[in-house]
């Protein structure tokens, strides 16, 4: 008998059936949280934060960039790593065992990586996200917080909010829009899905990324004494990686009724900057460096309204663009990164290297028959489940 079959057949946890008004407050605070993509740029910071807040964390990650960012957490008694591919239903089901909540970060991330690896991007970002939400609901998980992106707004001359028309200009953004829909349509009385549309991330992480605009330009200014910023008049909603982690933590612990079925932009109004603002900070930081502005035909331009997340989750970003740039620069000055051009700091380059090393294994995220079987094996009558508060 496989390990999966064994735990699916285990005695079920007794579940209370009480009206939602009687549910004690602590039920709003999920104990056991699955974080997909926990070893990534955002995931490791979020995981550390959740452990500090007293949650148990199951990290589901196939360690594309190694385990360096979470290795220090391995001895933690409330931390568990499931090293595997999210697209494999059995791996996902193993991670979801007894989970109260899921934060779904794992993805093929960024426009270039998705354009270069279309099939993997569609399978991971779209199909596996839908599968994960269905599986979570079927296995008695009570909420899922999905990592979407503000790039779903694409190019728009106006300030956009959650009700604005979506205008994706990349496969990456398209897969995220589809995944939002698939995740949100799993909403049920016992299951609350939420999508957070993350702004343009920057800042230091144990898994540094130098394919992010701010981080890359900061490294170029320090190491090469020159950086070119394209289309300085375009807007982006910048948000620091630690603030992103705080936003997810707030969505995880908010009352169900506040976040049930909601889409929220994750960032702050003060974080909307023209790209030329990066040049201003870099010129102050490295007056001797040449920081140039040039024009291209890149259409991406978006300025985002973040009032909803402030009202719903009382979320406010704490770290400014300038503080984040100075932080990255100080880490580089301290020698924490030997060569920022290394492929492992750039998602698309790293995927290319990995592809040469290993054939892509077959996965069954699209195997709906298998999904039905896993859910049927574990079926819990709706009345046995505790309703979401
Ligand atoms: N960083 C940003 O600027 C930004 C902005 C908006 C949205 N987001 C979203 O936030 C999430 C996290 O982004 P990040 O910057 O931390 O990315 P990242 O590339 O640093 O991390 C992604 C992690 O997911 C894992 N992963 C990928 N495919 C997997 C699979 N099939 N199975 C298991 N694990 C898998 C990788 O091993 C990696 O550890 C993504 O969903 C991304 O779309 C990020």
Image (cartoon, rainbow, N blue to C red):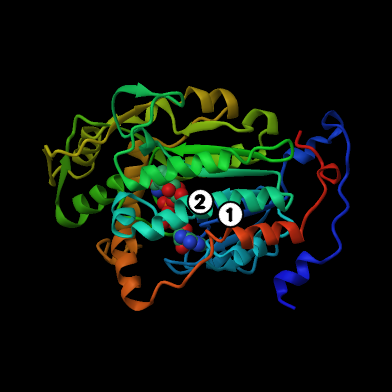
**Image quadrant assignment for residue 262:** top right
Residue at 13% x, 47% y: name it: 289
Location of mark 1 (residue) = 35
Residue 125 visible at all: yes
Q: Is mark 2 within 8 Å of ligand 1?
A: yes
Residue 145 position in % (x across, y down): 58, 43
Please tell me which residue lies in front, 178 or 193: 178
Q: Residues within 10 Å of mark 2 (few under 14, many from 20)?
A: many
Q: Residues within 10 Å of mark 1 (few under 14, many from 20)?
A: many
Confirm whether residue 201 shows in the render. no
Point out which mark residue 105 bears: 2
Q: Secondary structure at mark 2?
A: loop
- Marks 1 and 2: in contact by CB < 8 Å? yes
Image quadrant assignment for residue 60: bottom right
Residue 125 higher or lower than 193, as above or below: below
Q: Residue at x 78, y 40 (%)?
A: 27
Q: Which mark is residue 297?
A: none
- Between 2 and 61, the one nearer to me in the picture: 2
Instruction: Judge from the rendering whether residue 306 lies leftward or rightward of residue 48; answer left or right.
Output: left
- Work out whether mark 2 precedes mark 1 in sequence or the reverse, and give the earlier one: 1
Q: Is residue 69 left or right of residue 208?
A: right
Q: Position of residue 316 (x, y in %)?
A: 50, 30
Report the Cα–Cα distance between label 2 and label 1: 7 Å
Residue 206: percent from left, percent from top: 44, 59
Query: Considering the image in quadrants, where does the N terminus appear?
Result: bottom right
Q: Circle 1 sits in a helix, a strand or a loop, which is it?
A: strand
Would residue 201 appear left or right of 274 to someone viewing this image? right
Ligand 1 rendered quadrant: bottom left
């Amino acid at each position: 008998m496989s390990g999966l079959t064994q735990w699916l057949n285990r005695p079920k946890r007794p579940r209370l059936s009480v009206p939602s008004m009687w549910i004690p407050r602590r039920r709003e605070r999920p104990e056991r949280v699955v974080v997909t993509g926990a070893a990534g740029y955002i995931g490791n910071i979020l995981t550390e934060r959740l452990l500090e807040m007293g949650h148990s964390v199951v990290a589901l990650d196939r360690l594309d960039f190694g385990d360096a960012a979470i290795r220090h957490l391995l001895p933690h008694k409330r931390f568990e790593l499931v090293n595997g591919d999210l697209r494999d239903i059995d791996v996902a089901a193993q991670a979801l065992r007894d989970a109260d909540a899921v934060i779904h970060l794992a993805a093929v991330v960024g426009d270039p990586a998705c354009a270069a690896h279309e099939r993997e991007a569609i399978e991971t970002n779209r199909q596996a996200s839908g599968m994960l939400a269905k599986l979570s609901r079927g296995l008695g998980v009570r909420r899922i917080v999905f990592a979407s992106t503000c790039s779903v707004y694409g190019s728009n001359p106006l300030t956009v909010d959650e009700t604005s028309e979506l205008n994706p200009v990349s496969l990456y953004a398209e897969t995220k829009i589809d995944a939002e829909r698939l995740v949100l349509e799993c909403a049920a009385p016992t299951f609350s899905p939420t999508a957070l549309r993350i702004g343009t991330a920057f800042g230091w992480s144990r898994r540094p990324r130098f394919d992010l605009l701010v981080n890359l330009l900061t490294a170029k200014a320090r190491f090469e004494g020159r950086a070119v910023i394209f289309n300085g008049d375009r807007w982006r909603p910048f948000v620091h990686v630690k603030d992103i982690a705080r936003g997810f933590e707030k969505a995880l612990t908010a009352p169900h009724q506040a976040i049930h079925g909601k889409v929220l932009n994750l960032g702050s109004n003060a974080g909307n900057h023209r790209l030329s603002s990066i040049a201003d900070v870099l010129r102050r930081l490295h007056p001797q460096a040449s920081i140039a502005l040039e024009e291209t035909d890149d259409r991406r331009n978006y300025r985002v309204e973040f009032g909803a997340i402030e009202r719903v989750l009382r979320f406010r970003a704490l770290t400014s663009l300038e503080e984040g740039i100075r932080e990255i620069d100080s880490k580089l000055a301290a020698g924490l990164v030997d060569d920022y051009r290394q492929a492992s700091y750039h998602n698309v380059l790293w995927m290319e290297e990995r592809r040469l090393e290993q054939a892509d294994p077959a996965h069954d995220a699209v195997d709906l028959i298998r999904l039905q079987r896993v859910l049927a094996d574990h079926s819990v009558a709706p009345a046995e489940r505790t309703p979401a508060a």
